Image: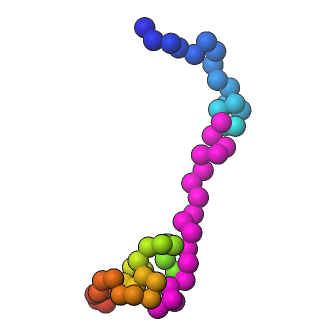
């Protein structure tokens, strides 16, 4: 049998440990081509541009 905890971990101790586990929002920047917001250092999903250069064509359906 493996190691087991000696005592029950209290709710306050458990919650204090989890205080740093919250998810953060992605850093959004404005696209220089179309003005839409997209995740930094990624191709804009609306127009297909990255740093002023066309990376792929986007179908506007």
In the shown orientation, is residue 11 left or right of residue 4? right
Residue 24, x across and y down, in percent: 59, 58
Q: How many marks?
A: 0
Q: Quadrant of residue 23?
A: bottom right
| Residue 14, magenta (yes or no) | no
Residue 47 visible in the snapshot: no
Q: Quadrant of the N terminus?
A: top left
Which residue is the extreme one toward the top? 1
Residue drawn where x is 71% and y is 32% of the image: 12
Q: Quadrant of residue 47?
A: bottom left
First to last magenta residue range: 17-35
Residue 60, x across and y down, in percent: 31, 90
Residue drawn where x is 52% and y is 80% of the image: 37
Given residues 19 and 57, the one toward you in this image is 57
Q: Quadrant of the C terminus?
A: bottom left
Q: Quadrant of residue 9?
A: top right
Relative height, residue 5 to residue 41 (above, below): above
Residue 5 visible in the snapshot: yes
Relative height, residue 29 to residue 12 (above, below): below
In the shown orientation, is residue 51 left or right of residue 27? left
Q: How is the image coloured?
A: rainbow
Residue drawn where x is 61% and y is 12% of the image: 6
Residue 55, x across and y down, in percent: 33, 83
Residue drawn where x is 57% and y is 63% of the image: 25
| Residue 34, magenta (yes or no) | yes
Classified by dominant secondary structure, the portion drawn in magenta counts as: loop
């Amino acid at each position: 049998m493996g190691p087991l905890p000696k005592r029950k971990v209290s709710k306050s101790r458990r919650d204090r440990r989890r205080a740093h586990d919250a998810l953060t929002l992605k850093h959004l920047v404005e696209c220089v081509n179309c003005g839409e917001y997209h995740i930094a250092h990624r191709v804009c999903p609306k127009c297909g541009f990255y740093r002023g250069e066309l990376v792929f064509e986007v179908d506007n359906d």
